[in-house]
Image (spheres, rainbow, N blue to C red):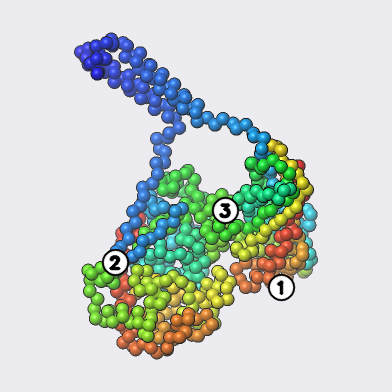
Amino acid sequence: MISAIRSRFSGFRYAGIAAICALLVTASCRYKDKAVVVTPVTPTSSYGSLTVKFSNEAGGTAIVMGSGTYTNAAGNAYKVDLLKYFVSNFTLIKSDNSEHNFANYKLINAADTSTCSFTLDSVANGTYKAVRFYIGVDSAKNHTLLNEGDLNPSNGMVWTWSTGYIFFKHEGTFINDTGGTSVLLYHYGVDANMKTIDIPVSAFTIAADHKTMLLKFDLNKQYGDPNVITFDSGNAVHQSLETRDRAWLGQMKANFSSAFTFDKVQ
Amino acid sequence: MSNKKLHICLAILALMLSVTVFNACKKDINPDAYTGPTPYLLVIPTGLPRMDIPANNPMTQEGVALGRKLFYDPILSGNRTMSCASCHNQAFSFTDSSNQYSIGIDGLAGTRNAMNLVNLGYQKKFFWDGGAADLESQVIGPIQNPVEMHENLANAIHKLNTDLEYPTLFKKAFGGDTITTSMLMRAIAQFERTMISGNSKYDQYVRGSATLTAQELRGMELYQDPAKGDCTHCHAMGSTFSDFEFRNNGVDSIYADAGRYKITLIGSDSGKFKTPSLRNIALTAPYMHDGRFTTLQQCLDHYNTGFHYSPSLDPVLSVSPKGRMTAQDMTDIIAFLHTLTDTSFINNQAFKHP
């Protein structure tokens, strides 16, 4: 074979062969490069997107971490150093009652507004009348800490002695009637305490566009509506996993329903 | 150079040029790119069951080696003074020598005795109360516990990411340029699954390569005899020597430590603790969840006459007659328990400080 080639081509032609080979390979390589370029998908007419934003308030005003002082329904003054909670399985409900669960796990950190919103892509066109989500993490993810993203156990939302996520965490200061201060530490969690939040919203329509929904969470409602939670009498510290936490857990679970409210869609 | 040689040279040159151009076009392939770790072949001694490896943490040589390094590295503690191995010493079957309670980095003592780390891959829940739902999740408990290694988990991960060696080692084991918490959990769990004991005198006897003395054989019978030791009800005979269930073994009638109840909040779980494996039991004193007994004789005395009645006392123990064992029976059982010591386990080079 080689001898046959040798007999037909003079030496300098090899340069030409090399060049052709190179060109061929380069061409094929260009073709490959072109093939992996992701062509922007033309937005289809059947889907839009929705950004969901949570604002965190106490008595109707935005919480100022560390310095803001608030008073709960029991008349207890308090401050907030840390406020985090898990919102999961956000579900949009259409006017025809069909539902779309986005199967997400979002850790809201009130101190960082960049964490207080998430965007749902592929929201089917249509008119929506309600939302549903959960405060907490479902048992599928709550029985192992080998999770990533917002469920990364380094996010400070796990117990050290029992596998599971702290669903809701408020750490701050309780200022008593005489001005004395003590630690306010509320760690809420455990499977049975995952809370379903159903919120009717003023009907809005997605038509291959993007909208933003604003939801509010109010800490004073969380501690006062309908169950008035006092920080007195040793109630300023609850960590969910003891018998003494049971009554508090029940009060907290019920209050979540009123603490989350719909604001507007824009 | 002859014409023939020139032709061959030029042909080779053409080929090389083509190859060069071809390689140049594969610009997305980094020569240092992660090619994947090497699977770790877990060897299970004859007589032990197959170990189920979770699908989300396959064993690899790089992962096991990394887990071993981490197990011994004080970098994971708040002040870089303690590692897992500080309280889990191989010489004592990975328990904390004779210490009833282990002392953490701040000089604070825990409230339970350090557990032996043997055949963990067969167990479903971890800690004395089963608080950790899987081996991976267990890993980060002691790191964060204020009375143990007392480190903020995010800070531990930061220290690893800024270390000179770890980023490369994690990349080899798991890929990726950034160390994540789940990688840390996976690595240590992988190493722990290799810590298999199955070469005690008892194991050799089962395999026909050793003989037990008459006393050891008597002890083995008494261990299983429902009217005598009846140990096997919970510390299942053979293999893992535990059913790993949660039981109240009657050490108290009023519980200083509610045990399993702290996790489940189910009243009937009060005073229940995980049945520990009896492998290497002669090496793991002191005994019971709170390390209250210093000798095996005290343990046998407890099960013979010393246990306390309470509503959640294990049903089997609650109907066991007190004083059912003679002094000789107990001595024989203890002789048998010594056959569960696996010196090849405590001397295994693969488990030592790397």
Circle 2 sits on which residue? Answer: B199
The residue type indicated by label 3 comes to Leu
User: Crowding near pointer 1: few (<14 within 10 Å), some, many (20+)?
Assistant: few
Mark closest to the chain's N terminus, 1 or 3: 3
Q: Are labels 1 and 2 on one chain?
A: no
CB of mark 1 within 8 Å of CB of mark 3? no
Q: Nearer the viewer, residue B194 or A135?
A: A135
User: Crowding near pointer 2: few (<14 within 10 Å), some, many (20+)?
Assistant: some
- Horizontal arrangement in the rendering, residue B116 relative to residue A39 (left or right): left
In whole angstroms, how far apart are the C-alphas of marks 1 and 2? 57 Å
Point out which mark residue A257 bears.
Answer: none
- Horizontal arrangement in the rendering, residue A106 relative to residue A265 (left or right): left
Residue B304 picture location, percent across and down: 40, 86
User: Crowding near pointer 3: few (<14 within 10 Å), some, many (20+)?
Assistant: many
Between disc 1 and disc 2, the foreground one is: 2
Residue A81 picture location, percent across and down: 68, 57
Question: Is label 2 in a helix, a strand or a loop?
Answer: loop
In whole angstroms, how far apart are the C-alphas of marks 2 and 3? 40 Å
Q: Nearer the viewer, residue A249 or A113?
A: A249
Question: Is label 3 in a helix, a strand or a loop?
Answer: helix
The residue type indicated by label 2 comes to Asn
**Residue at the front extreme?**
A96
Label 3 resides on the chain identified as A
Name the residue at 24% across, 81% down.
B214
Residue B141 picture location, percent across and down: 51, 62
- The quadrant of the rendering that contains the N terminus of chain B is top left
Circle 1 sits on which residue? Answer: A233
Question: Is label 1 in a helix, a strand or a loop?
Answer: loop
Circle 3 sits on which residue? Answer: A151
The residue type indicated by label 1 comes to Ser
Question: Considering only vertical position in the picture, is B29 above or below A241?
Answer: above
Name the residue at 28% across, 11% down.
A9
